[in-house]
Image: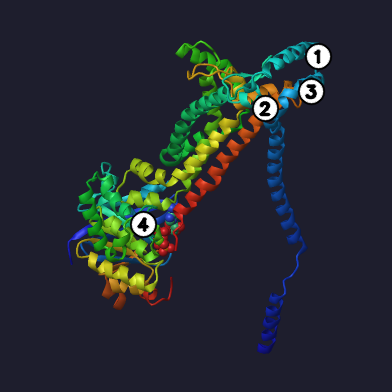
Amino acid sequence: MNEIKVKVKDLSLWYGTNHALKSISMDIPEKMVTAFIGPSGCGKSTFLRTLNRMNDLIDNVTIDGEVCIDNINIYDKDIDVVNLRKKVGMIFQKSNPFAKSVYDNIAFGPRINGISQKSILDEIVERSLKQAAIWDEVKDRLFNSALSLSGGQQQRICIARSLAVNPEIILMDEPASALDPISTAKIEELIHELKKEYTIIIVTHNMQQAARTSDLTALFYMGDLIEMNRTEVIFSNPAKKQTEDYISGRFG
Amino acid sequence: MARGTGKVAKSDIVTFNKKKFRFSDWFAEKVIKSVAFLSIAIVILIFVFVFREAFPIFRMDKKVAASSELMVQESYGGSDSGSTEKVADNQVGNSNKTQTPGDSPSSTLLSKTWMPVSDNPRYGMLPLFLGTLKVTLIALLFAAPLSILAAIYTSMFAKPRIREVIKPVIELLAGFPSVVIGFFALMVLASVFQNIFGYASRLNSFVGGIAMGLAAIPIIYTLTEDALTAVPKTFTEASLGLGASRRQTAFYVVLPAAVPGIFAAVVLGLGRIFGETMIALMATGNAAMISMNPFDSVRTLSATIGAEMAEVVFGDTHYNVLFLIGSLLFIFTFALNALAEFYFKNMVIRKYQSKK
Ligand SMILES: Nc1ncnc2c1ncn2[C@@H]1O[C@H](COP(=O)(O)OP(=O)(O)OP(=O)(O)O)[C@@H](O)[C@H]1O
Ligand SMILES: [Mg+2]
């Protein structure tokens, strides 16, 4: 097992009075793929969003506990959320490229970080698109609107966009759930490539996808972390009965 | 049993082929349709009427030489002894006029003096246009930045509690009758600004412009705020997720995406300012003169109609000219609204829809 990148200690979260995460603790290793599975509404997205403090945007959220990334608690008072989000990128379920050209989408992150030199931007755009395995498909239309691409291409543009700011961790919330099997396969392949350099945490509803792509799998149920282990253990020899029931499709 | 259900299904399919006539649906559709067409018809009719009344001005040139007698006749219609005198003067003026062909009513339209009631009436609309332009520009320069910044603040930075106070307060301003705003400008703004800037004429295009700006702020603010909140939340999330600050997200992501809607808001505000009559009457001083100084009195197009229509002789050249001004106002505001509605709104739609 690689070194621990993210260490979560007794994390609880309330939406108003709704206790959505109940004292979660887990260790997420570096440069591996960790998958979160569980029935709808069990708190997977909520937990994922606590890892780059996206829940700060929602009113009325109370958070208790610690999330340490590289041994620094990101809920400390003097944490700069903006810099945290540069380090922890996020891919959403529905692809959300800006209504700008492909180039401007990728260059957005570097630009807000103050990079304006054309040659450097060109290089970052090309590198990110290549890393996201979409360079060949868009290299001739870098200046067309990103919205003119297909759904699968848009999602890979979003991945490229987040790679352009050099994150260390990439959070993906059901990145392939709106895509056809071929696009899904491309994304999965991409995840496999990306884990050489990045720590990847992915939420998925698709059990096969979790089994195919991830090194570790965590099962959530009603705001509790039921079980977390190496993926092959979870899928072949789970410790808890609930896990066995869920992966064999008996509930959820 | 199986056969039975099969039968039911079959007869269901049969009824699909026959469209059932539903009277209430048909009736409702017709009513809605006719109301829609009626409103279009009314707009067209208003325009036809206004323009018809303005039209004679262009034919009058030919008649003008022969019309001195006719004009006397017409003027007698609604006149007292006071204006009889004027008519006599008029005749003298006319006899002079026939010598100089440049004095036909339509040729004075582009002259620099608006003096419709005089011995030698001149209908130069230039000072009116200039006055309208000045007031509109001042109002827009005052209202647009203020309301756009306020909208950015409430839609993107303000805490919900603060937003819930600011938004309704600004929108309340939209319900103020323009008489009230005009009165406020007349009594308060004029004096305050005079103390600050020390200008000579108390009522002027600056005071009028600010007052009209007040009337336009709620329109521009509300529509801008709508445009900003219509920008998909996913854009904001994406931007923040990439490590952009709130300010960067507001100005580099949300604002550019809302630009067409903001343009539409400004254009509609412009329409409001342009057609505003009561505030213009009360706060601009109503002197038709050509001057670039914002602290000189001005007379706007709509105020001219408002002030003079009640006193004008029916069918007179002056009457026609006022209708010509009305037609121009109509065309301008119509063009502005059409621009906002069709051009900018389509831009918004095109922006968010991915073409497949
Ligand atoms: N913005 C919010 N405000 C209030 N409650 C929320 C909010 N988002 C989620 N919740 C609640 O928190 C709980 C967990 O939701 P979450 O979205 O994390 O589930 P999930 O596991 O991602 O489900 P799904 O698989 O359907 O995406 C649910 O009960 C949900 O109703
Ligand atoms: Mg979810």
Q: Which mark is residue A144?
A: 4
Residue B132 appears in which quarter of the rendering?
A: top right
Using the numbered discs, state the Cα–Cα distance from disc 4 to disc 3 in whole angstroms. 68 Å
Residue B211 appears in which quarter of the rendering?
A: top right
Using the numbered discs, state the Cα–Cα distance from disc 1 to disc 2 in whole angstroms. 22 Å
Q: Residues within 10 Å of mark 2 (few under 14, many from 20)?
A: many
Using the numbered discs, state the Cα–Cα distance from disc 3 to disc 1 in whole angstroms. 18 Å
Out of B53 and A248, give the one closest to the viewer: B53
Same chain for mark 1 and mark 2? The answer is: yes
Whichever of callouts 1 and 2 sits on the residue coming sooner in the sequence is 1
The residue at which mark 2 appears reads as B322
Q: Chain of mark 4?
A: A
Asked whether, in this view, residue B280 is left or right of residue B350, the answer is: right
Using the numbered discs, state the Cα–Cα distance from disc 2 to disc 4 in whole angstroms. 51 Å
Residue A42 makes an appearance in the image? no
Q: Indicate which label's residue lies in the foreground, 2 or 4.
A: 2
Q: Are marks 3 and 2 in contact (CB under 8 Å)?
A: no
The residue at which mark 3 appears reads as B70
The residue depicted at 53 percent of the width and 12 percent of the height is B201
The x, y position of residue B202, in whole percent, is 54, 13
Using the numbered discs, state the Cα–Cα distance from disc 3 to disc 2 in whole angstroms. 20 Å
Out of B252 and B75, give the one closest to the viewer: B75
Same chain for mark 1 and mark 4? The answer is: no
Secondary structure of the residue carrying numbered label 4: loop
The residue at which mark 1 appears reads as B80
